[in-house]
Image: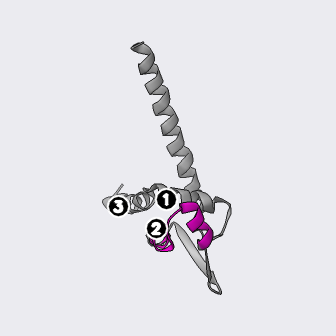
Amino acid sequence: MNRELYEHRARIIKALAHPTRLAIVDALANGEVCVCELQRIAGGDISTVSKHLAVMKAAGIVAYRKEGLRVFYRLQVPCILHFFGCVDAVIQHNAETQDRVAALVR
């Protein structure tokens, strides 16, 4: 593969690399969510949540629409959720490996 593709992949992965952003993506799994609800889920002030959303929007992860004064976000490409399953599989594998090693020293 060429370097440019790796750079695009890295930009998307970096945009996800924050616990608050992962929580936002998870919250968007079932469809559009108002920024006010994302603020409640993320637990930060509106400006912090907006900055996280801007990072993800720039990476193409989320899109938005306005309805009056309210702004609703959605996943641009919902298949990004498959990434969570892969990450969870790595976590599970690491835990199993750690358990096997710990059993050796007991």
Q: Secondary structure at mark 2?
A: helix
Contact flag, marks 3 and 1 (Cβ < 8 Å) = no
Would you say the residues marked 2 and 3 are in contact, meaning their CB atoms lie under 8 Å apart?
no
Q: CA distance from mark 3 to mark 1?
A: 23 Å
Residue sitting nearer the eye, 29 or 70: 70
Residue 84 within the magenta-colored segment of the rendering: no
> Which circle, 2 or 3, is nearer the viewer?
2
x and y percent of residue 91 in the render?
49, 38
- Judged from the image, the secondary structure of the residue bearing numbered disc 3 is helix
Answer with the quarter of the image where residue 40 lies.
bottom right
Residue labelled with disc 2: 52
User: Which residue is at 54% across, 57% downward?
Assistant: 23
Q: Is 40 in the magenta?
A: yes
Report the amino acid beneath label 2. His
Instruction: Point out the image quarter for the N terminus.
Output: bottom left
User: Which of the marked residues, 3 or 1, is nearer the chain's N terminus?
Assistant: 3
Q: Residues within 10 Å of mark 1 (few under 14, many from 20)?
A: some
Q: For the point 52% across and 34% down, which residue is it? A: 92
Q: Report the residue at 51% width, 56% height from top.
A: 22
Instruction: Say which residue label 1 marks.
Output: 20
Q: Which residue is mark 3?
A: 7
Nearer the N terminus, badge 1 or badge 2?
1
Q: Is 74 rendered above or below residue 26?
A: below
Compare residues 91 and 77 and report the one nearer the observer.
Answer: 91
Q: Specify the segment rendered in magenta.
A: 36-53
Left or right for 67, reference 81 = right
Q: Position of residue 16 (x, y in %)?
A: 46, 58
**From what the image shows, is residue 23 above or below residue 36?**
above
Q: Are marks 1 and 2 in contact (CB under 8 Å)?
A: yes
- x and y, in percent, of residue 90 in the image: 48, 38
